[in-house]
Amino acid sequence: MGQFTFNRVVGIVHTLASDPALSVDNLLEKLCAGTGFSPKDLLGRSKSQSVASLRQGAYYLLHEKLGLSHPETARFMGRKDHTTSLYGVRKISGGLEAYAH
């Protein structure tokens, strides 16, 4: 499995955010493409930095680009608490602001 820095994940999210074909059905596959991780990894319980960053990217894209609420996003990702989604969206949003500069 690959090691991905937070900045690399932000770059992937930036690219996917402008993908008109992005949907709830294909998001995890597209996010994982070329990373060495699978959608199953993102839906699992791993707390490795790389998986956690990719998971945060999924929260951001599901909420900000595909319009799911935080509770819907958390359920989609197999989580019980919507605050995990909220944290991920905020973290990626901050990364995207820095990425743009």
Image: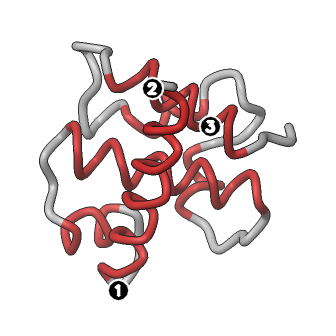
Residue at point 31%, 15% (across, down):
19
Identify the residue position indicated by label 2 in the image: 14
Residue at point 71%, 41% (across, down):
37
In the rendered image, the quadrant that contains the N terminus is: top right
Disc 2/disc 3 C-alpha distance (Å): 9 Å
Judge from the rendering whether residue 21 lies leftward or rightward of residue 91; answer left or right.
left
Identify the residue position indicated by label 3 in the image: 9
Q: Secondary structure at mark 2?
A: helix
Q: Amino acid at mark 1?
A: Asp
Closer to us: 37 or 3: 3
Disc 1/disc 3 C-alpha distance (Å): 23 Å
Q: Nearer the viewer, mark 1 or mark 3?
A: 3
* Residue 50, image x, y percentages: 75, 51
Task: Count up the numbered dots.
Answer: 3
Q: Residues within 10 Å of mark 2 (few under 14, many from 20)?
A: some
Q: Secondary structure at mark 1?
A: loop
Identify the residue position indicated by label 1 in the image: 81
Judge from the rendering whether residue 8 lies leftward or rightward of residue 10; answer left or right.
right
Q: Nearer the viewer, mark 1 or mark 2?
A: 2
* Residue 95, image x, y percentages: 53, 44
Q: Amino acid at mark 3?
A: Val
In which quarter of the view is residue 81 placed?
A: bottom left
In which quarter of the view is residue 6 placed?
A: top right
Residue at point 67%, 37% (across, down):
7
Q: Residues within 10 Å of mark 3 (few under 14, many from 20)?
A: many
